[in-house]
Amino acid sequence: MTMHQASGRWKLGLALALITAACWATLPVALKITLERLDPITLTWVRFLVAALVLALWLGIRGGTAVFATLDRRRWMLLTVAALMLIGNYVFYLLGVQHTSPANAQLLIQLAPLLMALGGIFVFRESYRPGQWLGLAIIAVGLGLFFGDQLRATAQTGQGYLLGSAYVIVGAVVWAAYALIQKQLLLRLSSSAILLFIYMVAAGVLLPFSHPRELLALDSRHALLLAYCAINTLVAYGAFAEALAHWQASRVSAVLATTPLLCLATVALVHAFAPASIAAEHVALFGYAGAALVVIGSTMSSLLGNKPEVIE
């Protein structure tokens, strides 16, 4: 079976991966505040619906939907499975955000790019140098230190912390499956076409379980945050899909591992200007040490690649 190969334009792939990381770092804060007024299913449905409408309009103008007529049964099945995996990721992650803090949820979801990296290596036969394997191990240690620190910090007050963590971990597993399926689908479909199908299926599946009337009760603040969450969906997954087209999945995943640090900074910034909007994160020395290891490991995994991918 022919496997998808990255274009080799690693600088473009790196830039797109960084855009994705920035979007995902700010998203948990916006979601946490929006959940004050919307239930998780309705919030997720709105994000998928807006993304589907905008992308359908854009692809319709460009004539990008004709490619679906060329797909065989196997690829339709892959598309459907990818859609179900991404729906699961959105719902389980949001349930996790409800029970834990934005930074904790964003930390645990980093299991997803780690799993994607392993999938890229073993499924797509992507090469990985010893220094990159060391970087991957350092990321894992850093995540463990941060998780242990947060688990101790919430032991007395965070009764729902473990439940929220479990939701996020399930979300990470199904996201990794989605990402690897999408990478293979890039052989025949553009990233925009793949996402359009996924968004449309997701909006249809979630509609019966959502409560659109809740949208009428939103104040301007929560409405703006909801709009940001919807736009974030388009930008983040569009950039992510294109990053996979130009750079290896294992490299993209390493860059995305820096997202928890960006999320910590976002929480601190929002709390400083609007303390009532979001609670401050409580991170001790081991937590910051773990965060630093994540940065070091992700940098090693990203930059210690094969020479043909580092030099254009």
Image: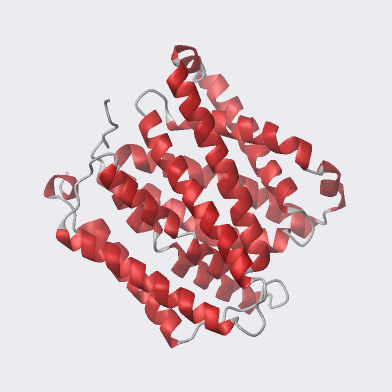
282 displayed left or right of 207 = left
In the depicted structure, whether residue 11 falls above or below residue 254:
above
User: Which x, y percent locates residue 42?
Assistant: 74, 46
Regarding residue 68, the answer to whether it shows in the image is: yes
241 displayed left or right of 85 = left
> Which residue is at the far top?
69
- Residue for point 25% across, 41% down: 9
In the depicted structure, whether residue 72 falls above or below residue 86:
above
Q: Quadrant of residue 152?
A: bottom right
Q: Quadrant of residue 268?
A: bottom right
Q: Where does the N terminus fall, quadrant-wise?
A: top left
- Residue for point 69% across, 56% down: 225
> Which residue is at the far left?
307
Query: In this view of the protein, which residue sits in the foreground, 254 or 13?
Result: 254
Q: Where does the C terminus fall, quadrant-wise?
A: top left
- Residue for point 52% across, 58% down: 169
162 displayed left or right of 240 = right
User: Which x, y percent locates residue 44?
Assistant: 67, 46
Query: In this view of the protein, which residue sits in the foreground, 56 or 125?
Result: 125
User: Which x, y percent locates residue 264?
Assistant: 51, 72
In the depicted structure, whether residue 74 falls above or below residue 186:
above
